[in-house]
Image (cartoon, rainbow, N blue to C red):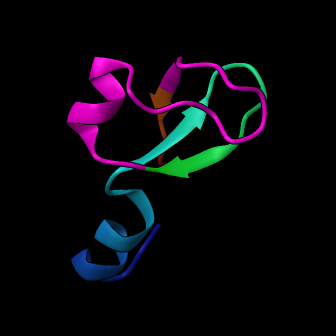
Amino acid sequence: MVKFPEADERWFKNTYVCKKCKTKTKAPTLKVLAGKISCKKCGRHSFRPLRKK
């Protein structure tokens, strides 16, 4: 999808999607796994990584 690794890193590194409302959030991986990050829109703590097409 991207032409060089720097662009791939900007788009997909530390980017997560809320499982309920599909809002994108950039946050460190360890904080997401620990459940310290909440969704800006709905307040949930369940996230998945951004899917590469």
Residue 42, magenta (yes or no): yes
Q: Which of 19 and 39 is in front in this view?
A: 39
Residue 36 in which image quadrant: top left
Q: Measuring 77% from the left and 38% from the top, which residue is drawn there?
A: 41
Q: Where is residue 11 in the image (x, y as percent from the top left)?
A: 44, 66
Q: Main secondary structure of the magenta part?
A: loop
Residue 40, magenta (yes or no): yes
Q: Which of 50 and 20 is in front in this view?
A: 20
Observer able to see residue 51 = no
Establish if 8 lies above or below 52: below
Q: Which of 2 and 17 is in front in this view?
A: 17
Q: Measuring 37% from the left and 72% from the top, which residue is drawn there?
A: 10
**Which stretch appears magenta?**
27-47
Q: Which of 45 and 11 is in front in this view?
A: 45
How many marks the image carries: the answer is 0
Observer able to see residue 6 = yes
Q: Measuring 45% from the left and 33% from the top, which residue is drawn there?
A: 37
Establish if 24 lies above or below 49: below
Q: Position of residue 22 (x, y in %)?
A: 73, 34
